[in-house]
Amino acid sequence: MTSNILLVDDEENNRNAIRRLFEDYDIDFVEAGNGKEALHQLTQHDIDLILLDIKMPVMDGFTFLRHHSDSKTRPKPPVCVMTAFDDADTRRKAIYLGADDFINKPIDPVELETRIASLLRISHQQRDLLTFNQNLEKTVEQRTQQLREAHERLQQTERANNQAYREMIARISRLTQFNQSVSNIDPRKLGICTAALGWLCELPQDQAENLRLSAQLYNIGMLALPEKLRETPIEQLKKDELAVLSSHAKMGSDLFKGSDIPLLKQTYNICLYCQEHYDGTGLPNRVKSEAIPLESRLFTTAKLILETLHNDPQASIQRVKNTLQDHAGSLLDPVIVETILQSNDALENIIKELS
């Protein structure tokens, strides 16, 4: 591979002498008589190494080094300073300005050959590294774009799937209309109220919106029970019949068990824990406090609000608040109750939406 060396010296004889030393080498020399010419040559040629004199007219070597260090050329070719000034200050200043190596005048051909070989090796390594990094950046950019496109396709698929799941849940929830003889609660209103509480408690928007559907399926397990048992008022059921009735939570949750889909996982939790109490006195597993999933605690709160309104359609806002306070810490999560009570208009707006 041919190397390009920029030879900067105001003495033409010096330049010719150096060129003759390397006639048999795979090296092309680009010449400049001062620093200003050298800066121009750098814009015209792809240079691997600069041999630089210090004392020159128009622009000396130090000034050239300042301009060269400030340039945005990458990679910068290494600079070997040729100088008759064999003193520490000259070397220190040149190094500070960006010089990589030195050789004293008069030049020793063997020493010059050795230094050029070493500096060219460094220059070629820098160039190879730059090429590698540029290719790597391009590859990373391409892969990143591919990942963005793949992620967008996955999001589109997920959105389509979520819409399909929502529609499926909405259709299935219509079956729960058959269970109103047992629950006396409109599943649609239960979904609205649970979702509203989710927003009030600052659930992520998608989770709160899912509550609108998942809450409607809390008693879907009832469909697995005998019709006579479903239609008999709870107060008329025998102890063994009540035990069978309470099993609907597990029956319903089993329909959604093991799913990784957020909407179906949420529905599973609401079905399974719909009879649990915050203080651990509920059914079927007597789970308590934060061990009950948040969506289930929100559901239980919404269910009590609707039961209060069903028993007394003219119930005042204060009556509903009092009912929530009475059950805080026993049936209900006290933190959720406190959140509702601290929001002046929240409960009133929820009740208006349910009417």
Image (spheres, rainbow, N blue to C red):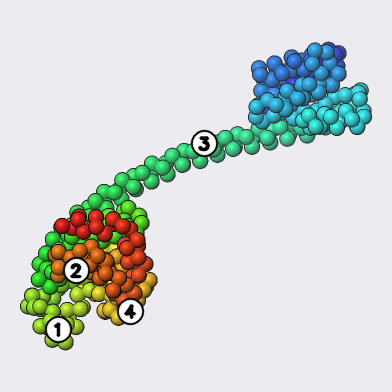
Residue type at the position of mark 3: Lys
Closer to the camera: disc 1 or disc 4? 4
Dot 4 surroundings within 10 Å: few (below 14), some, or many (20 or more)?
some
| Residue 41 in the figure: left or right of residue 229 | right
Look at 83% across and 26% down and name the residue there. Answer: 81
Closer to the camera: disc 4 or disc 3? 4
Q: CA distance from mark 3 to mark 2?
A: 64 Å
Closer to the camera: disc 1 or disc 2? 2
- The label number, if any, that marks residue 280 in the structure image: 4
Dot 3 surroundings within 10 Å: few (below 14), some, or many (20 or more)?
few
What is the count of numbered marks? Answer: 4
Q: Can see residue 55?
A: yes
In the displayed structure, 31 sits above or below 259; it is above
Look at 29% across and 49% down and name the residue there. Answer: 159
Reading the image, the residue beneath label 2 is: 308
Q: Earlier in the sequence, mark 3 or mark 2?
A: 3
Q: Earlier in the sequence, mark 4 or mark 2?
A: 4
101, 310: nearer the viewer = 310
Q: Earlier in the sequence, mark 1 or mark 2?
A: 1
- The label number, if any, that marks residue 138 in the structure image: 3
264, 33: nearer the viewer = 264
Q: Quadrant of residue 1?
A: top right
Reading the image, the residue beneath label 1 is: 241
| Residue 142 in the figure: left or right of residue 70 | left
In the displayed structure, 311 sits above or below 95; it is below
Residue type at the position of mark 1: Glu
